[in-house]
Amino acid sequence: MFVSDCLGVSPEGHLTIGGCDTVALAAKYGTPAYVMDEGNIRQNCRQFKASIDEYYDGNGLVLYASKAFSCKEIYRVVASEGLGADVVSGGELYTALKAGFPADRIYFHGNNKTREELIMALDAGVHRIVVDNLTELAVLDKLAKEKGKVVDILFRIKPGIDAHTHAFIRTGQIDSKFGLALENGEAMEAVREALSFQNVNLAGLHCHIGSQIHEIEPFELAAEVMLTFIKKIFDETGFLVKELNLGGGFGIKYTDEDRPQKYTAYMQRVSTVVKKKAAQFGLPVPFVLIEPGRSIVAPAGITLYTVGAVKEIAGVRNYVSIDGGMVDNPRYALYKSSYEVLVANRAADPKDYMATIAGRCCESGDLIQENARIQKPAPGDIVAVLATGAYNYSMASNYNRIPRPPVVFVKDGESRVVVKRESFEDLVQNDL
């Protein structure tokens, strides 16, 4: 019935998540509010971990991609499930460390890390730094030398794969701000340079071809390209690359039109390619890493809003105004991202009303969905937008000086706040 199996309908006809009535949650915590099912998050972590253990014979690691959703509690959860963490900024790294996440399970990404961030990563002893370009490589070698350290790195490689996704979230082709290209020889140049340095150790390679990808074939092709490059490095330099990070980007179900592949199907097919190519080249199977983020947290989350005005313009459209908008979910404004929307206090009723869900910001483009089928709403009703666990809280802003919502975790009928609602005082605390 719903895009996620953590959702249901109560005897009263209310939407539930993690055994909690969403109408009661809205009354208790206010709206807007992000609500996430901790049990579903843990289940997703375990599915990925079990799958990589099975298909790579325990020779791999799942890294939670922090950019999807970052706060102290999510790091505690994924750490307890045996995952590593992929961070892309000093802020994400700081949050992970403050949560007690083990530094030896942290991989630090980013296409333009600052000098201060690199120093922070070196001082913290993160497990791997994923180097994006030759400039960063030289800076990192110099900083490591100053600290008397040898730092383990991966190179981010552009495998030249078009992942058939939104142009803004395709990252594997040559025309991308991320990584080193194979086609023009810069990737091999970076490898040779790293091998000549004394304070960096090339531990492996990384690639990421995009996000919200529903097909398995692009991942298979990326694995083949990367194994071929590992073979080329070995043939030309004698150096054996021992780690291969195949990134993330696994699609999830936002609406009934989405047809994502099962995690196990992806893992089985891609692992077959990795093992086949390694055997063909006479090389050992590398230690394999993957970076699911969205697919771990997105299905587990919803956002609750309260309906304000309902504006019906005859022959044009119906606007349903909510007390949030692009400040807490900018993805429709950015990508025209599709979501399932419903009236939480009428979840059992048919969706027989066509509406545009309008946010409260002073922007005509502040919309959450257009032409969405929902139950007929009235002022004061609770609207739920589903599958918002990823790239909502993490992309939220204070535009129009609107405080960010809280994050509430639910599990087995219990709820707790893991990120407090911002106050007006929070908005001005850094003002002078």
Image (cartoon, rainbow, N blue to C red):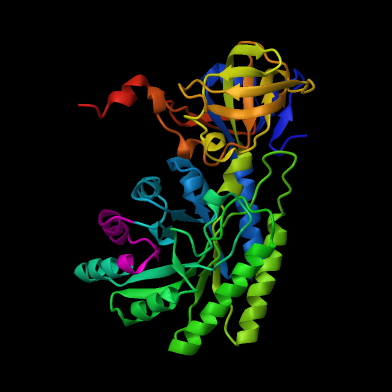
Q: Which span of residues is magenta-colored?
A: 113-136
Name the quadrant of the C terminus. top left
Q: Compared with residue 54, is residue 388 higher up or lower down, i.e. above or below?
A: above
Q: Compared with residue 148, is residue 69 higher up or lower down, i.e. above or below?
A: above
Does residue 134 appear to the left or right of 171 in the view shown?
left
- Residue located 54% across and 68% down the image: 159
Give the quarter of the image for residue 253: top right
Name the quadrant of the N terminus. top right
The outermost residue toward the front is: 315
- Residue located 47% across and 55% down the image: 85
Give the quarter of the image for residue 284: bottom right
Q: Is residue 232 magenta?
A: no
Q: Position of residue 358 (x, y in %)?
A: 57, 22
Residue closer to the observer: 279 or 259: 259
Does residue 307 appear to the left or right of 214 in the view shown?
left
Q: Position of residue 189 (x, y in %)?
A: 39, 78
- Residue located 49% across and 73% down the image: 182
Q: Is residue 120 magenta?
A: yes
- Tell me if I can see residue 238 in this picture: no
